[in-house]
Amino acid sequence: MRIVFIGPPGSGKGTQCRRLSKHLGVPHLSTGEMLRWKRDNTHDGPMVAGFIDGGNLAPDQFVMSMVSCRISESDCRSGYLLDGFPRTVVQAELFDTHLDQRNGQLDHVFQLVASDDELIRRMIRRSELEGRVDDTPETIANRLSVYQARTRPVIDYYADRGLIRPIDAMQSAETVFANLLAMIETNE
Ligand code: AMP
């Protein structure tokens, strides 16, 4: 089971992936979390911080090699949930090449849909709880515009392949999760 979650910051990708990971027994891979770990623990830290702390995207090749290492590990053999990757069309193309070379394919690409007002409200609340450096008002605005410019085209990329499954992410986390499960189980 290989599943991709696409959605703007604050749309609930992390929340849904954590639940689904437990339910399906496959790992939840968040590129945001991987990058924050690299920022705080590796020699690449300052380079990574230069991109992510201001809400800009880390370089495509860098992210792809991080993801390809992780999905080659044994716990990903029966699948994985990708939270926040691919985030550009170049990443989607690199990922397709990676999958093709291994005769792999994606099962689902879920698009979480929510209004900007709701996203901003959720990110401001999260900043009070988690204190993420990229949840300031200026950086939130930048992340939303980066999403429109760089990540929205990824939705068209997968829609052309008939893979996109839009989900209303304005509902409660429980309702969104129930809808996700129904789509997976009926392969809708
Ligand atoms: P997230 O935790 O998904 O909100 O991601 C936090 C930040 O990490 C993003 O704002 C980007 O700066 C960076 N990031 C996460 N995933 C990617 C990706 N696939 N490509 C480039 N940058 C990413």
Image: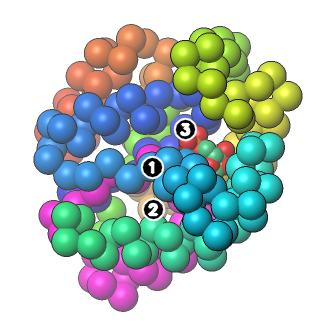
Q: Secondary structure at mark 3?
A: loop
The yes-or-no answer for disc 1 within 8 Å of ligand 1 is yes
Q: Residue furthest bottom?
A: 101
Above or below, comparing residue 93 to residue 101 in the picture:
above
Magenta region, residue range: 77-104
Residue 93 is at least partly visible in this image: no
Quarter of the figure with the N terminus = bottom left
The residue labelled by disc 1 is 30
**Where does the image place residue 133, in percent across and percent down from the top left?**
70, 33
| Residue at 36% in and 88% down | 101
**Where does the image place residue 187, in percent across and percent down from the top left?**
20, 45
Residue 96: say if magenta: yes
Residue 55: say if magenta: no
| Residue at 85% in and 28% down | 138
Q: Secondary structure at mark 2?
A: loop
Q: Nearer the viewer, mark 3 or mark 1?
A: 1
The residue labelled by disc 3 is 7
**Where does the image place residue 159, in percent across and percent down from the top left?**
50, 53
Amino acid type of the residue tagged 1 in the rendering: Ser
Quadrant of residue 127 within the rendered picture: top right
Work out whether residue 188 or residue 116 is closer to the camera in this orientation and state it. 116
Residue 175 is labelled as none
The residue labelled by disc 2 is 161
Task: Please give left or right for residue 103 compared with residue 148 in the image.
Answer: left
Mark 1 or mark 2, earlier in chain = 1
In three-dimensional space, the C-alpha distance between marks 3 and 1, rounded to whole angstroms, equals 13 Å
Task: Please give left or right for residue 36 compared with residue 172 in the image.
Answer: right
Question: Callout 3: few (<14), some (14-19), or many (20+) C-alpha neighbours within 10 Å?
Answer: many
Task: Please give left or right for residue 93 compared with residue 149 in the image.
Answer: left
